[in-house]
Structure formats: C-alpha cells, structure tokens
Amino acid sequence: MADMSVYGYQPSLGVGITGLTLFTLSTCVHIYQMCKVRMWWLVVLILGGITEMIGYAARIYSWHDDTNLDAFLAQTVTLIIAPSFFSAALYVAFGQIIHILGRQYSLLPPLWYTIIFVIADVISLIVQAVGGGQAADAARTNADTTNGTNIMVAGICFQMFSMSIYVILVIIYIIRLLKAKVELTRDMKIFLSSISLVTLMIFIRCIYRTIELSAGWTGYIITHEVYFACLDGLPMIIALITFNIFHPGQYIKNTNQVNALKADIPL
C-alpha cells in the first residue's frame, strides 16, 4: 500500500526508467569518449554516472516494492553522493583551463584547484556516506535517524561551501582576464559556458538536498517525488550530458600546445 511506503509515496516507474536509461546512455558515451581522448581523470564522470544508475535501479525496484527499506536507503545514499564525482571533474577541468589561458590571472596555481577542491569533495563524500550509514542503521532498527541525517546535511553543506569558494575564484579569474583584455577563442568561450552550466546544476541540486533533508525523512519535499525529479534528477542528467556534448577532450586536449592567451599582460 502507498501509505506504507518508506518514501511517503509510490516511486514513479517512469521517473526510474527515464533516469536509469539516460544515465546509462550518457555513462556509456563517457566511457567511449574517455578512451578516445585518453584523459583518464575523466573516470570521475563515469563513476558518478554509475552511482546514479545504481540509485535509479533501486528506485525502479522500489516501484515494485515501496516498503523495502534497503532499496530506499540504497537510492538515497547513491543519489546524494553521485554529484561529488561531477564537481571533481569541474575542478580538474578548470585547472587545465588556467594552464591554457594564463596562470598569472589565477589566485591559486592550477594544480591546487585539483588538490584542494577534490580533497574537499572527498571529505564531503565521506561525511555524506557516514551520515547515510548511520541513518540507515537507525532506520533498520526504528531508532532516531536525526544524527545520521544531520551528518548527511553537513556533508552536503560542506560540498556547497567548497564549491562556493571555487566559484568565487573562477569569477575573480575571469574578471582578471577581462581587465587584461585577454581574447578568448570561440571554443574556450563555449567550454567556459558549459562548465558554468554544470556548476549551476550542481548548486541547484545541493540547495534542494539541504532543504529536503533538513526537514527530516517525513518532510513535505522529501515525500513528494516531483521535487526530486525536477531538482535532483533533471539537474544531474543535464550536468552529465553537458559534459558529453561539450567534452573536455574537445577543448583542453592540447593544453601544452594550444594557447588562447592573445595578450600577456602582467598583473
């Protein structure tokens, strides 16, 4: 019965199949693209896609049995941590962009973007996983899930905080480029726009998850699937497909040869 569902509703089979299909197709394309351009760090996108696939497979099972706690917890944990892999790709990609456009305009050395923000992403992922594990254990024994939930929210908030710092640094970098009157190639403008879109999608999802989990497991948002579909599923598939269409291999594969910096004006 729907009123006995651990979701507070019966998960839509259409949402589950659509999500699983799109993430599977996009991930398969990413595997091909990564092997073609031999940029192995892009495996983070594949890992994120696979994590999303597991989550949607669990939601499909939940349509069959929406009282199954294990399936509910599996989709909760996987779909909460998956975006951490996508944001990791952003950090590495931006470090590569700095190599191309000019290191002198960045507040941090290019490699630091990868080191600092990927480490922050890993911390966020671990915190979310620990919180999810505690909440799962509590749910199985009908105990209070508040502590585990709060830990998960803390992990998401930390991810949003670290990404906010990243966005600020990107904005400062772009402002410095504009002040220096650096001429960007058309391809670089397109790629910068694409990673901006991915960043926006991850931000929207982080805000949604923070509000959702802060209200607890019986709150209004978490018990209405339309919010999940529109504010988690849709932004994440847009993010992953955006990386398919505007693949980093198209724009930063020649980091050591291609220089879009037309004016070398010191700060």
Image: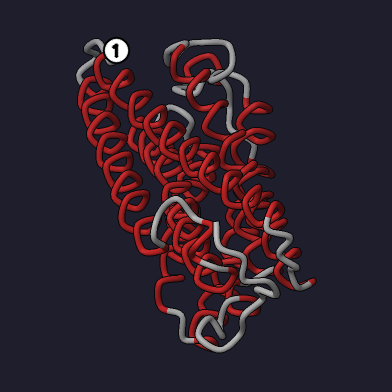
Residue shown at 50% from the left, 27% from the top: 209
In front of the other: 147 or 71: 147
The percent position of residue 72, horizontal first and vertical second, equals 41, 33
Q: Is residue 185 left or right of residue 233?
A: right
Q: Is residue 125 left or right of residue 173?
A: left
In front of the other: 106 or 35: 106
- The three-letter code of the residue at mark 1 reads Thr
The percent position of residue 230, horizontal first and vertical second, equals 69, 34
Q: Is residue 25 left or right of residue 69?
A: right
The number of numbered discs placed on residues in the rendered structure image is 1
In front of the other: 10 or 178: 178
Q: Is 207 located above or below residue 23 in the figure?
A: above
Q: Which residue is mark 1?
A: 146
Residue shown at 68% from the left, 28% from the top: 226
Quarter of the figure with residue 132: top left
Residue shown at 58% from the left, 11% from the top: 220
Q: Residues within 10 Å of mark 1 (few under 14, many from 20)?
A: some
The colour scheme used here is secondary structure
Q: Is 266 located above or below residue 217 in the figure?
A: below
The percent position of residue 135, horizontal first and vertical second, equals 27, 24
Label 1: which secondary element: helix
Residue shown at 46% from the left, 70% from the top: 42
Q: Is 90 located above or below residue 69 in the figure?
A: below
Identity of the residue furthest to the right in this view: 186
Q: Quadrant of the C terminus?
A: bottom right
The percent position of residue 81, horizontal first and vertical second, equals 40, 43
